[in-house]
Image (cartoon, coloured by chain):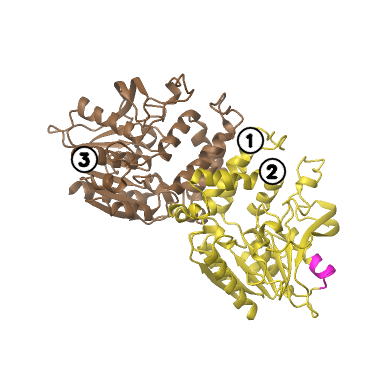
Chain colours: A yellow, B brown
Amino acid sequence: MASPLPPLQTFQLNDFRLQCGATLPEATLAYRTHGALNADRSNAIVYPTSFAVTDADVAWLIGPGRILDPERYFIVALNMFGAGVSTSPSDMARDPGTGRFPSFSHVDNVTAQHALMTERFGVDRLALAYGWSMGAQQALHWAALFPHRVERVFAVCGAARTSVHNWVFLDGVRAALTADPAWDGARFTAHPERGLRAMGRIYAGWAFSQSFYRERAFERLGHADVESYLAAVWEPNFLRRDPHNLLSLIDTWQRCDISANDVFGGDLDRALGAITARVVHMAADTDLYFRARDIRAEAGRIPNGEYAELRTVWGHRAGNPDGSPGDEAAIRDAVERLLAR
Amino acid sequence: MASPLPPLQTFQLNDFRLQCGATLPEATLAYRTHGALNADRSNAIVYPTSFAVTDADVAWLIGPGRILDPERYFIVALNMFGAGVSTSPSDMARDPGTGRFPSFSHVDNVTAQHALMTERFGVDRLALAYGWSMGAQQALHWAALFPHRVERVFAVCGAARTSVHNWVFLDGVRAALTADPAWDGARFTAHPERGLRAMGRIYAGWAFSQSFYRERAFERLGHADVESYLAAVWEPNFLRRDPHNLLSLIDTWQRCDISANDVFGGDLDRALGAITARVVHMAADTDLYFRARDIRAEAGRIPNGEYAELRTVWGHRAGNPDGSPGDEAAIRDAVERLLAR
C-alpha cells in the first residue's frame, strides 16, 4: 500500500470464553478495514493474519491491482489473538492458579471475528475468507464452523490441521527460543535476544525452499551473502516481537485442527465435509512445512474444494509473495477467478 | 554387529598442519579395523564417520550380510576430527592468541586418514571409500585429493560441497546451541542442556522427511507419540555430546567444499573432474538438506560418476538405515554391484 493505512480499530468481547476453558472478562479484537461495505453487505472479505505479524505487516497485498482490491471489496484485516495487537500475553494477566497465560485456538479467533462481522457490520455472509499460513487455517475454520456465513475461501500455504512434521518444526523453534538465558522455565525475565536470533535463523531454513538458497535469491533481494541476509532480515524479524506472544502463537499453530472442537469431535473428514463454501486450497510445490501433498489431500475432502499449486522457489513464503511478482500474479489471478464464480 | 567391536586404535600425527594454518604438535586419529587386510592389500575400505557420532555408533552396518562385509573386506572405521574420539576440542588447548579452537576441514580429515592407510597399513589403493552424510563428504575428498589411491567411492546422502541451504539449516542449529545460558560468547561454562535439547528437536525436523512423520513412522520404532519420540531419542542424542565438539563439527560441515583448497582453488568442476574413481553418488529422494537435485548435479560432473536414488520416507536418515530394512537392502545391493565392477 503506497497510501497510509486506515486507522486500527477495536471490537470488545465481554466475558469471552476461550476453548481452553478460561474466560476473558474483556477481550479485544483489533482490525482495520480497507474499502467500503456495499449496500447489500455482500462484498466483505476477512483477511486474518499469519504467524508473528500484525495486519499492517501484511497489508501490502491490499490495493488496486493487487491480490485484494479495496475499490471493490470491504476488506477486514484481522489480528489474531496472541500476536500483540488483539488480546495477547503482552497485555494479559497470567492465570493465578497455573501461572500460565490462557491458550488461544483458531476456534477462539474465528468466534471473535464472526462476532465482529455480524454484530458490528451486519454481514451475514462473507464474499471471501482469505488467508495465508495460519491465516489460511483461520479461513478454513470460518468455513467449517460457520458454513452458512462463508461464500468462498482462498487458503494459500496453510492446512486445516497442522501436520506432525509441522509440529516438530515449530517445536524446534519453541525449544530454541526457550533455550535463552532469560527463560526461567515459565516466563522470560528479560528480552531473549539470543533465543529470538536463533529462532530467526532456524525459521530462515524452513520459510523458503532449498532452491531459493541454491539460486541465491537473497542476492536479488539486495543482500550480499547469506549471513548478512539472516542478520539483516531474519534476526530483526523476531527480535522486535514479544517472546510470550510468540510462544502463544506457536501453541495455537501446533494445536490447530479444524475438527478438534465440540462440533466435530476430532473427525477431520466431517469437519472438511461440513464446508459448503467454494474453496481454493492452494499450495506451493516447494513449501517445506505446509506440504503440497497434505493440502491436496485436504482439498479432495472438501465438497467444493479445488486444489491449486504455485510453482516457485519461494517455498512457504510464496503464499505471502512480497518480492515475488510471479507468485503474486498467480495468487491474484486465482483469487479473481474464485471471486467471479 | 552382534559381536563385540574390535578394539579402538590410534595413529599419531606429529606436527600436523591443519588447513586453517594451525599446527598440532600431536594429533590423534582414532580408528577401528573390521576384517583382515588381504595379501596384496587390495581389499581395504575406509568408512569415515558422519556428524556427531563415534565409529561405534555407526558400526551396525558392518557385518556379514550387511552393507560392509568384514569377511571379505578390511574395513577401517575412521573417527572424524572434532567428534570426541580423534583429536577434538574436548581434548585440545585453545589458541592462546584467539581463544578459539583450531578449525578442522575435511582436507585435514582425509590427509590424516591417508597417512594412516599408507604408512601403517601400506595400502596403496582403496577398494572403496564409503560414507554417509559428512562421511560421504570425506569419501569424495579422498577421491579428489588422492585420485590414484581410490578405486571406488560410495557416497550416500552427502555432497562434495555443502549447499547454501544446508549451511542455513546448520546455522540455525548452531544458533540454538549457543542460545544456551552456559554460552559466554566464546565457550560453554557448563553443559548446555537447554541448547542441546533444542538442537535435538530442531534436528528431528530435518533428519527425516515430512512423510516419515505423516506416516507416524516413529510409532513403528516403538514410540507412543511424537513428543515422547523427541524426548527419548533426539534430546539424548545430543545431550551426551561435548558442545564444543559439536560446534567444531558444524564448522567443518558448513565450510565443506571439495574445491576450497590449494589444489583446486575453488573450482568445483575441476575438483569433481579430478576424480578417477568409479563413484556412486546416492541420494534419498526425500532428503531435506543433502538434496537429490544437488547430488544428481554433482554426479554428472564426476567422470565416472553414477547417480542413484533411494525412494524412501526416511529422508536424510535413509543413508544410515538403522531401522529401515528397505533402504539398507538398496544400499547393500548398490555397494555390492559397485564392488563387483
Q: CA distance from mark 3 to mark 1?
A: 47 Å
Amino acid at pointer 3:
Pro
The part of the chain drawn in magenta is: A115-122
Determine the image quadrant of residue A136. bottom right
Residue at 69% x, 43% y is A243
Is residue A309 inside the magenta stretch?
no
Residue at 49% x, 36% y is B237
Q: Is residue B193 above or below residue A106?
A: above
* Marked residue chain, label 2: A
Determine the image quadrant of residue A236. top right
Residue at image mark 2: A243
Query: Residue B144: x percent and y percent?
Result: 26, 41
Closer to the camera in the image, B38 or B295: B295
* Marked residue chain, label 1: A
Amino acid at pointer 1:
Asp
Of the two numbered discs 3 and 1 in the rendering, the one whose residue sits closer to the viewer: 3
The crowd level at tag 2 (other Cα within 10 Å; few <14, some 14-19, many 20+) is many
* Marked residue chain, label 3: B
Query: Residue A177: x percent and y percent?
Result: 63, 41
